[in-house]
Image: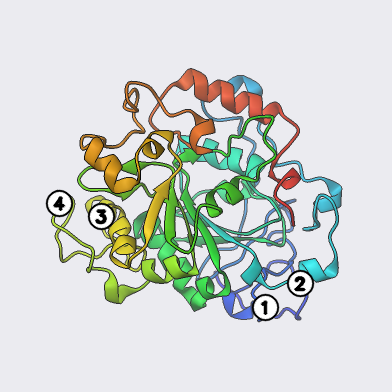
Amino acid sequence: MSSTSTASENAVSRGALYTSKDWPSHGRLPDIGLVDPAVPFGVFFSLFPGAIPVLHRSNRGWLGPAANQGPLTKPAIPESIAHGASPKTATSDQQSASSKDRPLIVYAYHDSESARANLDYFANKGIHNGADFVFIFNGDANASSTIPDLPNISIVKRDNTCFDMGAIGEVLKKDDLWKKYKRFITMNASIRGPFLPAWSSSCWSDLYLSKVTETTKLVGMTLNCIPRLHVQSMIFATDDVGMSILLDPTVATTASEDDRFGSKDAPVGLSRCYADWNAAVHAEVGTTGLMMNAGYKVDAMMTALHSEEGVEEYCKAHPDSGDLLWDKKYFGSNIHPYETVFIKANRNVDPALMASMTEWHMRMKSNSFDVCGS
């Protein structure tokens, strides 16, 4: 099923596809009506021909250890911001500002029980008006019904190909979407968050993006030294300089090395569609090398890294420091969600802590709309 949008500049009829070629020149995501009138929420934007613009209501309960919370409902959007206004104030000038001043946050999703719980949590606690969001749904799933109807949110439904990094790259390259922005966060549904202490007034996306500087162009949660130094890819923050490197196919093999996942001739970064798990992991491992070969630094949130002078010094001091996001692999303990803002949530690591943190934060009335601006 496909259709062509016949929308005017400011409106789209219900049920029509809104394609990327119709985006306004200033790059902001347009405010459109519902795709399916039977669904009381959700926005569908299709960047690819043949996408099926149908959303479904989800009546399932909360997934994961904190099942006693009962049904996890659609994120409660205060009436004052239900149509994209700031929690405080919103002027027409603010709403029409160039997307160049706004980050783009790209969330890649493939359906599983843990991914659904992580998406639900993010939809309630992570979305805000200080950035534009693109949710990529890889494969068939009704999970898109979780996403609130806001003008700064778009949804892409596509076949489950390329793995997360390749899918993110394809969406960003489509119609040069990435060139409309200067700051980026890419992430996948293997992590749950954001988690911030009750006393914190920080915006989670600002915490990541503030670490991207003139000299540091790739920031993540954790650093892995095996098979070689690399920032793990479940969440990346970068800017337009860094993204231009990650998406450049002409440099995709310049940082590649032989390892158990692939060869030195295999591409890395976000510029290719990866056919299998080994190729995708090889691409993740080599992405840090792309940045460092270009003369830039990388960084991660984990505290242990900052006990050394830098990432290379850390891996020299801890050459056996591999994937720390397994149970008791963080120097005999586990990374706390407050340390990295997000936490790997598909490995059954400290399920009691995960259940408690999820329940406590879901019961809090605050969310990212309160602290992330407009």
Mark sitting on residue 276: 3
Distance between mark 3 and mark 4 Cα atoms: 15 Å
Side (left or right) of 211 relative to 128: left
Q: CB atoms at circles 3 and 4 under 8 Å apart?
A: no
| Residue 124 image point, x, y percent | 66, 40
Q: Which residue is mark 4?
A: 259
Looking at the image, is mark 2 or mark 1 earlier in the sequence? 1
On the image, numbered disc 1 is attached to which residue? Answer: 26
Can you give x and y, in whole percent of width and height, for residue 152 in the image? 68, 61
Task: Give the CA distance from mark 2 to mark 4.
Answer: 48 Å
Q: Earlier in the sequence, mark 1 or mark 3?
A: 1
Q: Earlier in the sequence, mark 3 or mark 4?
A: 4
- Residue 233: percent from left, percent from top: 38, 50
Asked if the residue under mark 1 is in contact with the one under mark 2, i.e. CB atoms within 8 Å, the reply is yes
Q: Amino acid at mark 3?
A: Asp
Q: In this view of the protein, which residue sits in the foreground, 53 or 306? A: 306
> Image quadrant of residue 138?
bottom left
Ranked by sequence position, the earlier of labels 4 and 1 is 1
Q: Residue at x 84, y 60 (%)?
A: 90
Q: Amino acid at mark 1?
A: His
Amino acid tagged 2: Ser
Q: Earlier in the sequence, mark 2 or mark 3?
A: 2
Name the front one of labels 1 and 3. 1
User: Circle 2 sits on which residue?
Assistant: 96
The Cα–Cα distance between marks 2 and 1, rounded to whole angstroms, is: 8 Å
Label 2, label 3: how many angstroms apart (C-alpha)? 41 Å
Rendered view: 5 above or below 266: below
Dot 4 crowding, Cα within 10 Å, few <14, some 14–19, many 20+: few
Q: Residue 292 appears in which quarter of the rendering?
A: bottom left
